[in-house]
Image: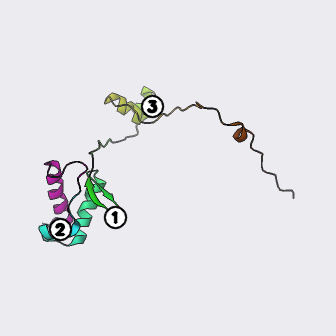
Amino acid sequence: MPREAPYLAVADVLRARILAGEWGIGERLPSRVRLAEEYGVGRNVVQRAMDRLIIDGLLEGRAGSGTYVRMPRERLRLVRSRRGERLGGSPSLVGMTERGKADAWDAHSQVRVPAPEAIVRVPKPATAER
């Protein structure tokens, strides 16, 4: 039976500690060196575990500052299907409406502020003669 990769085991333990509230949202995690010593693994294993949790949306890395617990975000699956098109509109928007979520972007944008006159009268580029 294949053994689980060490970084996945460390990621699971860190995830459990985060979800248990050991580190609050916005709080900085201990350094990779300290966590590596605590779990008896290399720094690269801890780095891969943290990368996994960043991908999962539990952590965020800040260059030169460390790794912090972030506000968990809801991950929505976007599935394209004919069902949404039959109901009218984008399949993702229909799915969000069914879950009671508002969309975060305007699919049918309109100009609300007219462009300045200098932009409206942009000269056309000269065509090259042959």
Quadrant the N terminus occupies: bottom left
Q: Residues within 10 Å of mark 2 (few under 14, many from 20)?
A: few
- How far apart in space, not on screen, are marks 3 and 1 (Cα)? 46 Å
Which label is found at residue 64?
Answer: 1
Disc 2 residue type? Arg
Residue furthest right as drawn: 130
Residues at circles 3 and 1 in contact by the CB criterion of under 8 Å: no
Q: Which mark is residue 34?
A: 2
Secondary structure beneath label 2: helix
Q: In this picture, is 30 found above or below 77?
A: below
Q: Is residue 61 visible?
A: yes
Number of other residues with Cα within 10 Å of mark 3, as a class: few under 14, some 14 to 19, many 20 or more: few
Pair 3/1: label in front: 1
Q: Magenta segment range? A: 4-27
Quadrant in which residue 93 is drawn = top left
First in sequence: mark 1 or mark 2? 2
